Amino acid sequence: MKQTKRLRRVGCGFLLAFWFALIVITPCTAITLISGSEIRLTRSDVPDDYALRMWLVQDANRRGLGVSTGFTTNPTSDTVCTITDTHFVLWKGSAQSSRSCACYAKADYTLTSEGADACQIAGV
């Protein structure tokens, strides 16, 4: 019986922590996006290496949320490439999902190629 009570208390504790996190994170995310900012979670010092990027789309013909996710590849020992996938959730207008690539020199992160050439170098 004691084991069941302990497990029940731990489960309730996790549920309560999740609930409070949800109550805090959701309004903070909404306020950040509404204030005109964007949310960026980065992985490294490589330019445009976003684990997640969210922003509000507020054009004349489009309204909604933009979400970008990305990853990096190392095609050679002195090159690093970032691949970014962008998706939109729009409630007004339409937009196509896209993929962009950029390759940088590892020494100082100077741009060496971008676009279709960079995607070919990255092997995507």
Image (cartoon, helix red, strand yellow):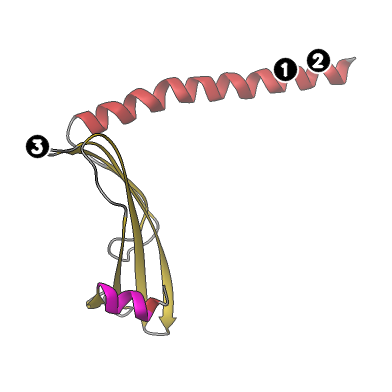
Read off the magenta span.
Answer: 115-121
> Around disc 2, counting alpha carbons within 10 Å, would you say few (fewer than 14), some (14 to 19), or many (20 or more)?
few
Q: Does the magenta portion include 17?
A: no
Residue shown at the point (86%, 21%) measured from the top left? 3
The front one of 3 and 100 is 100
Cα distance between the residues tagged 2 and 1: 6 Å
The picture places residue 52, in percent across and down from the top left corner, at 37, 49
Residue 20 placement (x, y as % from top left): 49, 20
- Whichever of labels 3 and 1 marks the residue nearer the N terminus, that label is 1
In this rendered view, identify the residue nearer to me: 33 or 116: 116
| Mark 1 crowdedness (10 Å alpha carbons): few <14, some 14-19, many ≥20 | few
Image x and y of residue 113, in percent: 24, 78
Q: Which mark is residue 98?
A: none
Q: Secondary structure at mark 3?
A: loop
Q: Which residue is mark 2?
A: 5
Q: Which label was assigned to residue 60? A: 3
